[in-house]
């Protein structure tokens, strides 16, 4: 019986009104299927982000000069100059000479639209992630060397089986919450449509139809995003197409107005 509702959702949305007969178990199963579709899309996007982080981290690590953190200061060769290295993910500042201020890092992150700023400054380690700054004094990093930093940057975005499992679990939870929100909003709109068509369905039945109507929009947008493309107004598009399917399905069974003689 579950196959019938999957067929309606993904292949025959003109019969969405049949979804009113779904049992609670079938509703949970259908919700799980849609959440899983969203999860694969979100996991794919997160893996792409982590892969980029790993590549960019390795690029920065390959060019880092030798240094040590000694007596709360960044110690390098006397002739080592300060420099800046930019990638798609990182804006890295190496400044053993005290010529760069943390405010300069923040300003450049905003100007260049780079998500992560890292500063190995003369007397502090500075980290800015999407606008949130985290200055760390060097007394917390005593003995920190270029080897430690290289290993750290090389491990960023490492996709071990445990990391992949964690990403999938987080993505499934986030997808479920997102789907639940979309389902609730669409159920309210479905209730309005049912009233306009002068049909007497309960809210629970309307919610069943709303859930199934999300099938094609969810699958279509998820496939596009899984290939790394950003879909603007994704929520609005999902609700819009779902409402269109609901409208055509409800219109087919709505009572006809009597023609005036």
Image (cartoon, rainbow, N blue to C red):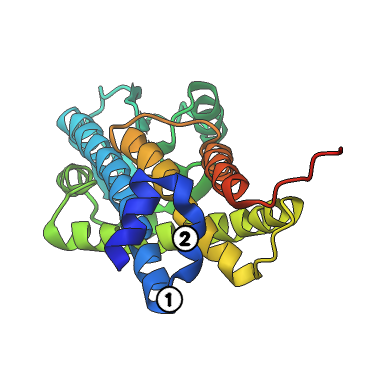
Q: Looking at the rendering, which quadrant does residue 248 occupy?
A: top right
> Which residue is rendered at x = 22% and y = 43% of the image?
153
Q: In this view, does 102 lie above or below 43?
A: above
Dot 2 corresponds to which residue?
18
Q: How crowded is mark 1: few (under 14 residues within 10 Å), some or many (20 or more)?
A: few
Q: Which of 189 and 130 is in front in this view?
A: 189
> Which residue is rendered at x = 34% and y = 27% of the image?
88
Dot 1 corresponds to which residue?
23
Q: Is residue 227 left or right of residue 121?
A: left
Q: Where is residue 8 in the image (x, y as percent from the top left)?
A: 38, 52
2 or 1: mark nearer the eye: 2
Q: Looking at the rendering, which quadrant does residue 165 occupy?
A: bottom left
Residue 187 appears in the figure: yes
Q: Which of 190 and 14 is in front in this view?
A: 14
Q: In this view, does 247 lie to the left or right of 213?
A: right
Residue 96 appears in the figure: no
Q: Where is residue 16 in the image (x, y as percent from the top left)?
A: 48, 53
Q: In this view, does 71 lie above or below 204?
A: above
Query: Nearer the N terminus, badge 2 or badge 1?
Result: 2
Badge 1 element: loop
* In the image, farthest residue toward the bottom: 24
Q: Where is residue 240 in the image (x, y as percent from the top left)?
A: 58, 39
């Amino acid at each position: 019986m579950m196959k019938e509702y999957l067929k309606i959702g993904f292949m025959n949305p003109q019969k969405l009104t049949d979804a009113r007969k779904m049992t609670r178990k079938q509703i949970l199963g259908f919700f799980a299927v849609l959440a899983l579709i969203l999860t694969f899309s979100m996991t794919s996007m997160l893996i792409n982000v982590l892969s980029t982080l790993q590549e960019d981290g390795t690029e920065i690590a390959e060019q880092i000069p030798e240094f040590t953190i000694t007596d709360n200061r960044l110690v390098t060769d006397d002739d080592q100059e300060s420099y800046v290295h930019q990638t798609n993910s990182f804006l890295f500042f190496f400044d053993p000479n005290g010529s760069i201020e943390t405010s300069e890092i923040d300003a450049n992150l905003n100007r260049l639209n780079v998500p992560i700023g890292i500063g190995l400054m003369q007397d502090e380690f500075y980290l800015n992630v999407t606008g949130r700054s985290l200055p760390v004094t060097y007394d917390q990093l005593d003995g920190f060397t270029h080897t430690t930093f290289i290993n750290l940057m090389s491990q960023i975005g490492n996709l071990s089986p445990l990391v992949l499992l964690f990403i999938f679990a987080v993505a499934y939870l986030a997808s479920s919450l997102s789907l639940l929100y979309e389902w609730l909003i669409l159920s309210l709109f479905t209730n309005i449509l049912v009233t306009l068509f002068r049909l007497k369905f309960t809210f629970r039945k309307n919610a069943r139809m709303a859930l199934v109507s999300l099938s094609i929009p969810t699958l279509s947008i998820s496939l596009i995003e899984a290939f790394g493309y950003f879909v603007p107004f994704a929520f609005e598009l999902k609700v819009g197409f779902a409402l269109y399917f609901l409208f055509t399905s409800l219109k087919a069974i709505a009572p006809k107005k009597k023609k005036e003689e």
